[in-house]
Amino acid sequence: MRAFLLFALVACLILGTGVLQSWNSALLILNMGLVSAVMALGVNLQWGLAGLFNVGVMGFVALGGLAVVLVSMPPVPAAWAAGGVQILTGLVIGAASIVAAVLVWSRLRGALRGWATAAVLLAGMVIYRMVLDPAVDAVEAVDPALAGYLGGLGLPVLLAWPVGGLLAAGVALVIGKTALGLRSDYLAIATLGIAEIIIAVLKNEDWMARGVKNVIGLPRPVPYEVDLQADPAFVERAAGFGLDPTTASTLYVKLEYGILFAVVLIALLVLAQLALKSPWGRMMRAIRDNETAARAMGKDVTARHLQVFILGSAICGVAGAMMTTLDGQLTPGTYQPLRYTFLIWVMVIVGGSGNNLGAVLGGFLIWFLWVQVEPMAQVLMGLVTAGMADGSWLKGHLLDSVQHMRLLTMGVILLLVLRLNPRGLLPER
Amino acid sequence: MDLLNGLVALANFVLIPAIAYGSQLALGALGVTLIYGILRFSNFAHGDTMAVGTMFAVLATWGLQAMGVGFGPLPTALLAIPFGILGAAALVLLTDRFVYRFYRAQKAKPVILVIVSIGVMFIYNGVTRIIIGPEDQRFADGARFVISARDFKEMTGLAEGLALRTSQVITVIAAVAIVAVLFWFLNRTRTGKSMRAFSDNEDLALLSGINPERVVLVTWLIVAALATVAGVLYGLDKSFKPFTYFQLLLPIFASAIVGGLGNPLGAIAGGFVIAFSEVGITYAWKKVLVYMMPPALEPDGLMQILSTEYKFAVSFVILVIVLLFRPTGLFRGKSL
């Protein structure tokens, strides 16, 4: 009942945006709200269900975005000819040298062990750079203004969503293997670091996804506005609703995105709910509430943690792929931890950690606030500064500061919820 | 001569920057490690505490400059540091009173405190951006160099120059002085001893009549001072940009953990380990090697192991290695 009322409230807020501002911005909020809800579901799986403190959400989201480029962009044949195979060889060599180093470390004993491992790593590194560097230069020299990267596989963009999840899951496996089992703060720092590294790789490895030159014009799963406007049947239908073709086409496209996202969200939500209620979910909560007891009962705590860490990260990857598809471009420079990691955390905590519906609710609500705090603050500041002289320094400064109000608001909301209602809007039970 | 040139190039591009950066990291990591030792949580808001303290110091610097107050060849910002510390101390004490104390009384789990500190981080970040804006601010003045590269070349007749910036010298002197005072305080004074006792065993400390709120108060004051000084020194050395300070969180935490969380000596060692690896791994060694190696072996490439954008990766990799092989850190902090 409480859940229904709160969701109705969020629906009213979004509908209100539609009536008061414009339906385009309402749909935009709805779409990003859906994406945010998916991310919040992923974090909730890790935190709410298993108590894992993952602050690397941004990295997994970015990996999802990378998947969109790798899957859906057409390949660049000239770049592949220039050094595609050589780059892949280089990567294989790099991976092989790490595997070899691990093998040396685990096989050897005694004083030689450390030196031998270091030597293997160093040799591997040198060969790797010797193979990779010229190939990278060659690829990046291919038509740098438009390409300069290998391109993708040219497959349908919807395929990128599960691939994004897989990519994130793969990275999560590696991180989880090393960092899980350590104390929760260490996992936090480790995930924070890996997220920064993923972004650094995306920004600098131009051969992969053009780095900060951005990949634009990603294929879309929905029709283009221009095509719709040129379609007489569509224009006629739009006129039937009393809309001009331009507005109608933008609304139609956003609505279609919304439907796609909603399908994903509902599917994941159903799965998450089933998982929560299953014996597996009960076991996870038992581990969360008392690790020692669960271990004494013969549960493999580390393996279960790894499992749920990978699942949650994969969901974040899917959400990242959805978001990049919606944007139609991959811009590694715009990924910021406050927006893509910590904001998701606010969503989960405010919504109610441990409750999937709560996470979804938090996703919508906090996203709505994130978007709308700025115009609200604008109005508020307008009132505050109304009495001041025009052109005064303070007035200008206060009006400028409006754009930073959202960070402050999010912090205050998070602290208030943690203090007054630590279980969130929709408590676990 | 070649060898000397090589050494000068090494000092100029690797040793001096790394020592300065290491001192800044060490001061930052000391703050993190003190909070961890006394209040028992990882403070994610530490980077933004540094930003807030620096912001107050920058504002005070501008005020002093406007009044025509200078500090001779030294940057005016040094005079402004006390104002920065005051501002930061007021803010963290308010935060502690209205936010952290509640959870302390509840004996909340550390991870809850970490999440709370994320909320605090948002607020500090917002405050900094609202007051001073997200842009780069330069506030360094005074003489820029103690020795400039050209003077050094003229003095010694070497081909390589050695530039020693004022900010670097100040950083090192300030760091040494502060660390000395801090260790004297922790080891010799009554309050310092009570802090260490509280960190070692809270219950025993309470039994022997140590007032926990006082210990916490002193800790926050020290942390505010450390964070402000670290922030101002970093800002003088590079420039003040709120987002950079947030990003410093990672190397700072890496330093504290590598040294052993909760161990002040470890924080300093960790700071230098991280700084030297970051600078060493992202530096293009060609310039140094050209002098050191026989001509036949001269390298073709830049001999740069990783490009500078990957400096976060370096602190991270060291962090992971230490966590895997020695989870308590180099100096046996508290862990696990």
Image (cartoon, coloured by chain):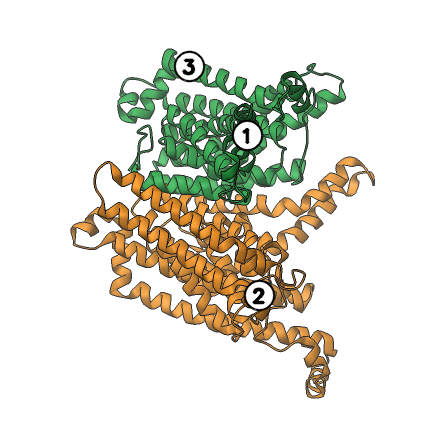
Q: Colour of chain A?
A: orange
Q: Residues within 10 Å of mark 3 (few under 14, many from 20)?
A: some
Output the chain of dot 2.
A
Seen in the picture, residue A194 relative to B54 is either above or below; the reply is below
Left or right position of A268 against B158: left
Label located before the other in sequence (3 or 1): 1
Q: Circle 2 is placed at which residue position? A: A79
Whole-angstrom CA distance, mark 3 to mark 2, is: 62 Å
View extreme (right): residue: A390
- Residue designated by label 1: B91
What residue appears at the point 65 percent right and 76 percent down from the top-left corner?
A224
Residue B330, percent across and down? 33, 30
- Chain shown green: that is B
SS state under label 1? helix
Residue at 27% in and 20% down: B207
Chain hosting mark 3? B
Q: Amino acid at mark 2?
A: Ala
Residue bearing mark 3 = B185
**Compared to A13, does A411 lie above or below?**
above
Q: Which mark is residue A289?
A: none
Query: x, y percentage for residue B102?
Result: 41, 35
Q: Where does the image place residue A8, in percent across and percent down from the top left?
A: 52, 66
Question: Badges 3 and 1: C-beta atoms under 8 Å apart?
Answer: no
Mark 3 and mark 1: span between their CA atoms? 23 Å
